[in-house]
Amino acid sequence: MMASFNFTVMSSEAAIYFLVLIILLHFRQRIGIGVFMTVLGTMHFLETYLAAKFYVELPFGAVSPGSAMMFTGKLLMILLLYIKEDATTVRQLIYGLLVGNLACLLFGVILGLHAGSGPGGVVIADENFLREMGVLMVWGTTLLYLDSLAIIILYERLGRFLGRRLVPRLFVAGAMTLAFDQIGFYGVLHYLTGAPATVFWAGLFAKISMAAVYAVMTAIYLALTFEERLTTSALTLTDLFNDLTYREKYHDLLSRSGTDALTGALDRGRLDREGTEMVRTAMRRGRQFSVMVIDADHFKEVNDRFGHLEGDEVLKKIAATLQRCLRSGDRLFRFGGEEFIVLANAAGHAEAVAMAERIRQNVADGVRAGSVAPVSISIGVATGPDQGQSLIELISAADKCLYQAKADGRNRVQGVLGV
């Protein structure tokens, strides 16, 4: 009875733990990412203390809430932080924890040089406890460093097999990483405290069970926030700790550049900077990347017949239709005049051509000049790395396809033949 009660309480603790941290992470742009990191860091001592000293009886054995509930939750939060931000932000958190714990261990040793006592001159600080906790905290953070590498790389690689099936993808990445962590942490715990083997097996089962709970909650959150960064990549350690700063660069570009005043699409200058970086990143990670060059058919006739103001309204409607048809990770740019460019990250050629066809059909069905004259567009599509490995090469290839679509009668999509 007590074991079942303890399991219910721990599950409730996991839900509260997740809810508090997810709120802080979700509102990081408003309150700052430092709040999330500080809260996660301040609980590290309690997590380690519980893992060393406090165990409760569950149906499958004695388990520490610090190890099973708090550490597992922290590891999934680090993965979620990576999904929402990037590896640069993740390593700031881990380095901060590691340096802080090393400082705790160092000062714990130095404090042993004092002839200290309690406030009344009786109680003396438990120096052995301080050293033991210091060692466990430093070792736990070192493992966390390795765990973070592992869970991120596993998450990315599992995308090749599991794709957008988030719950199994998160769970398998978490469970495999936690199995490694349990081996490493239990070894030191056994050395310091003599913890029996039953602690290892019960802790492993509890961590994997909690990984399933957190995987479900994380997947629900990502689904509710429409997170699109669920693609696969050939991620390497170099990428993880040196190169994965694209989102940081993207937000910096966002703050320094604007959008096209008429259509609301991103402007030409933004294409030159952001588009180049997007293609370079995709090529480095081994991802496909598609470019669409879109042109309004017979647009001069629209201006001549209905006037330039109505021509401007038609461009606005085309841009709005294009935007509605894109995935949240795609980018729409106004290239000039009546021409637009779409960058479709992680889209293969067949997928991009199908997307372009949906765009063309939506414009043909929904856009009218002067509320009476139908408007059509022609689209050329090219995909890297087969048709090019730079933005200029892909735009050039897509532009040739657009020219062919125009020559074949307009109001059509043309991809690279034979692909």
Image (cartoon, grey):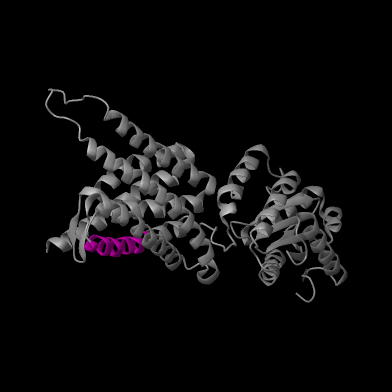
Q: Is residue 227 left or right of residue 357?
A: left
Q: Is residue 55 left or right of residue 162?
A: left
Q: Position of residue 305 (x, y in %)?
A: 85, 56
Q: Is residue 201 left or right of residue 178?
A: left
Of residues 390 and 220, the one drawn nearer to the viewer in this rendering: 390
Dividing the image into 4 quarters, which one contains the C terminus?
bottom right
Residue 193 higher or lower than 28, as above or below = below
Residue 382 higher or lower than 112, as above or below = below
**The magenta stretch spans residue 392:** no
Number of numbered discs visible in the structure rendering? 0
- Residue furthest bottom in the image: 418
Residue 247 higher or lower than 382, as above or below = above
Dividing the image into 4 quarters, which one contains the N terminus?
bottom left
Q: Is residue 15 left or right of residue 249?
A: left
In magenta, the rendered stretch is 197-214
Task: For residue 118, say whether it is visible.
Answer: yes
Residue under the point 46% across and 40% down: 33
Tell me the chief SS of the magenta region. Answer: helix
Q: Position of residue 226 (x, y in %)?
A: 50, 57
Q: Position of residue 203 (x, y in %)?
A: 27, 60
Q: Position of residue 288 (x, y in %)?
A: 67, 64
Residue under the point 31% across and 50% down: 17
Of residues 335 and 177, the one drawn nearer to the viewer in this rendering: 177
Residue under the point 53% across and 49% down: 87
Where residue 102 sits, quadrant-wise, is top left
**The magenta stretch spans residue 204:** yes
Task: For residue 297, say whether it is visible.
Answer: no
